[in-house]
Image (spheres, helix red, strand yellow):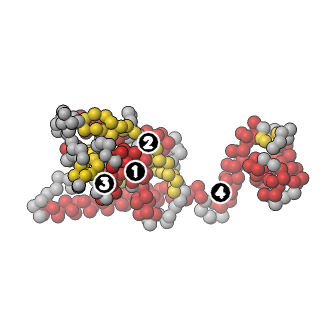
Amino acid sequence: MDIRWLQDFLSLAEAGSFTVAADARHSSQPALSRRIQALEAWLGVELIDRSRYPTSLTPSGKLFRAHAAELIKKVIDSRAELQGEPTHENEQITFALPHALAISRFPHWWKEWQEETHRPACRLLATNVHDAVTTFVAGRADILICFHHAQQPIFLDPERYERVSLGIEWLRPYSAARRGQPIFRLPGASRLPVPLLNYSSGAFLGRMVDLIRQSAPEHLYAIPAFESDLADVLLSMAVNGHGVAWLPEGTAEKAVHDGKLRLAGDERWALPITVFAYRDLAHARPSVVKMMKSLERRALKQVIQQEKSGLHLVSGGRHSENSDTAS
């Protein structure tokens, strides 16, 4: 089989016309037609339904189309690898992570990470926590970046998956601001309950909010006002004065800086959540291994800096209880 047969077939499948496909392949129509017939003879099935216009694929042709594209990719990548050239697949790293981290944290992280890993290409799969984990375990992502809490842990076998801490993300209650003060404050009052902007049932951050409320320092007077899967949707609703939303600190950061949001409660209404990066040890592509090694070095530097900071505070007689929060 000639790889040009596959290229001709894909061009014809895309164009739906022998004439247009022949022009795209810089070939005559009869020559392209002969190569398509040669491919059909080699496979033993008809790929093109020649009884219809415009030209269309047979059921076998539709099935083979994806295989043809994959075969061409593998041939090109194999040749590049044998010649010592990096392939796109080897260099590209696919990350699966929750929307909240993809939007608020990942752009900054990626800028820093690229400086230490020779700028590999990046593919981002942003979804909810459950689907991010499922995608990663199914092998459709190289690295999973995910929230983790002792009372709502992500169960991944440590014998198969290594993990690196990326730090702590605080979940805090926020309200729109008016003259520099929050419009709504926790815990509210019986006569004036706080409208809550909630996460949809089953969402990871929603379960974290449940943990906060279960251990609340006092009774919360509140009524549900809105619900969404996405932290950024709740952010927009909170900024526009619709109620109180528990948001990851990174999600609320810019709105707080711009004076649009203020904390609606103190630290008793907040919860620290660890962020981990995971890699499947069975997948050892050099670019992925190098990325995880870089994250390990950065995590170690953070620990050393925190230890130094803690020693400095102790020596000054002001020991900080939060000096070990970024695990």
Q: Which mark is residue 101?
A: 1
Residue 315, position as x, y percentages in the image: 12, 63
Residue at horizontal 53%, vertical 59%? 121
Q: CA distance from mark 2 to mark 3?
A: 26 Å
Q: Name the residue tied to disc 3.
A: 260
* Helix, strand or loop for disc 3: loop
* Helix, strand or loop for disc 4: helix
Q: Residues within 10 Å of mark 3 (few under 14, many from 20)?
A: many
Residue 169, position as x, y percentages in the image: 31, 50
Q: Which of the two discs, 3 and 4, sits closer to the camera? A: 3
Q: Name the residue tied to disc 4.
A: 77
Q: Earlier in the sequence, mark 1 or mark 4?
A: 4
Q: Name the residue tied to disc 2.
A: 128
Amino acid tagged 1: Leu
Q: Which of the two discs, 1 and 4, sits closer to the camera? A: 1
Q: Is residue 174 left or right of residue 279?
A: left
Relative to 214, is 165 above or below?
below
